[in-house]
Every structure is written in C-alpha cells, then in structure tokens.
Amino acid sequence: MTSRRQFLFDCSTAVAGLALVPMSAVRLTAMSDGGFQSLAQMSYPVLAGQINTVFRVRLSPLRAVELKLLKAPLAPPTPITQGKRLPGDAGNEKFSLIFSGPKDPLIEPAIHRFEHGQLGRFDMYVGQIGTQDNNGSVRYEAGFNRPVPATATFKNLNLT
C-alpha cells in the first residue's frame, strides 16, 4: 500500500513531467484522439457531479477496468493568518476523487487513460489508497492541487 506522502510525491513528479512536454505536442495529441478531453478543462463541480457513476480505466488497448466514483471531497481554503506568509498554493483548489474498483487486476499508480460516458476520454494519475473493503473492492485516489479555473465560482456551489 502506498503512503499519502508517496502518493503526493508521485503526483508532483507526474505533473512536473507533464510541464516539460511542449504544449504543441499536447494539442496535436488531443486533436488526433477524437473525444479526448484535457483534465485541466474539467472543473471541480463537473468532476464531483459524477459521483456514483462508472469510469473505465484503460490498462491496454484491449483491457479496461471499471471504477466507481464514490466521493469527491473538497479541502477548505487555506486560512489567512496575520503576520504569516501564505503558502504558494494558498489560492488553489484542493480536492480528490475517491474510486472503488475490483481487487483483480490492481491498477498500478500511474497516469492512465480514463473513459466516461459524459466526460469523454482523459488522462489522470490515480493510485491505490486502501486495500480491500468489506465487499472486496480496492480504493483509489486522484489528488488535485491546482489554481482555481478563471470560470469557476465557489460561491454558487452547494457543498453541504
């Protein structure tokens, strides 16, 4: 089982690697891949709105595993403390997507191609966060810590 610290390190490494890829290559890949979506274009409300729906994870061109989105917890904003310096990610939206899937096959922690009926296809890093629960399934998590998209307004969200 992977620790939270290792999971965050793996996510950071994956994001840093993606930052080195020229944007023209990313655009070319997206255009040639039919219904491919950029995860950066999907807001928290859009992703969280898919709770209790099924996502297919491509392990190979002929093999896929279905994961069910269980929850999408949103971390509270970073509090502003007088006299203290704000962390570099203070204005970021921080949330995770928690999935449940079969114990066989286990999905390796990596960037995988996801497919969803409403969201299309997109690449996302996911890692195992738990062993089997009571019904024999395994938990996976995708963590996000990114600037709030300019079009997102959290005042209108009903997060209760």
Image (tube, rainbow, N blue to C red):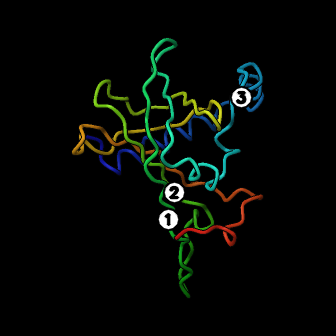
Residue ID at (52%, 13%): 61
The label on residue 75 is: 1
Q: Residue furthest top?
A: 62
Q: Position of residue 38 (x, y in %)?
A: 68, 37
- The mark lying in front, picked from 2 and 3, is 2
User: Which kind of residue does numbered mark 2 sit on?
Assistant: Phe
Q: Is residue 94 above or below residue 99?
A: below
The answer to whether the residue labelled 1 contacts the one labelled 2, judged by CB atoms less than 8 Å apart, is yes
Mark 1 or mark 3, which has the lower sequence index? 3
Q: Position of residue 88 (x, y in %)?
A: 58, 64
The Cα atoms of the two marked residues, 1 and 2, are separated by 6 Å
Q: Residue at x 21, y 45 (%)?
A: 134
Residue type highlighted by circle 1: Ala
Relative to 78, 70 lies left or right: left
Position of 58 with respect to 32 (left or right) is left
- Front one among 139 and 39: 139
Q: Residue at x 30, y 38 (%)?
A: 138
Label 3 sits on residue: 26
In the rendered structure, are the residues bearing label 1 and label 3 in contact, judged by CB atoms less than 8 Å apart? no
Indicate the position of residue 94 as horizontal and vertical percent values: 54, 59
Q: Secondary structure at mark 2?
A: strand
Q: In whole angstroms, how far apart are the C-alphas of marks 2 and 3?
A: 24 Å
Above or below residue 90? Residue 27 is above
Helix, strand or loop at disc 3?
helix
For mark 2, what is the residue? 95
CA distance separating discs 1 and 3: 29 Å
* Residue at image point 75% right, 19% down: 32
- Mark found first going from the N terminus, 2 or 3: 3
Q: Residues within 10 Å of mark 2 (few under 14, many from 20)?
A: some
Using the rendered view, name the quadrant where residue 109 is placed.
top left
- Label 1's element? loop
Vertical arrangement, residue 89 with respect to residue 26, above or below: below
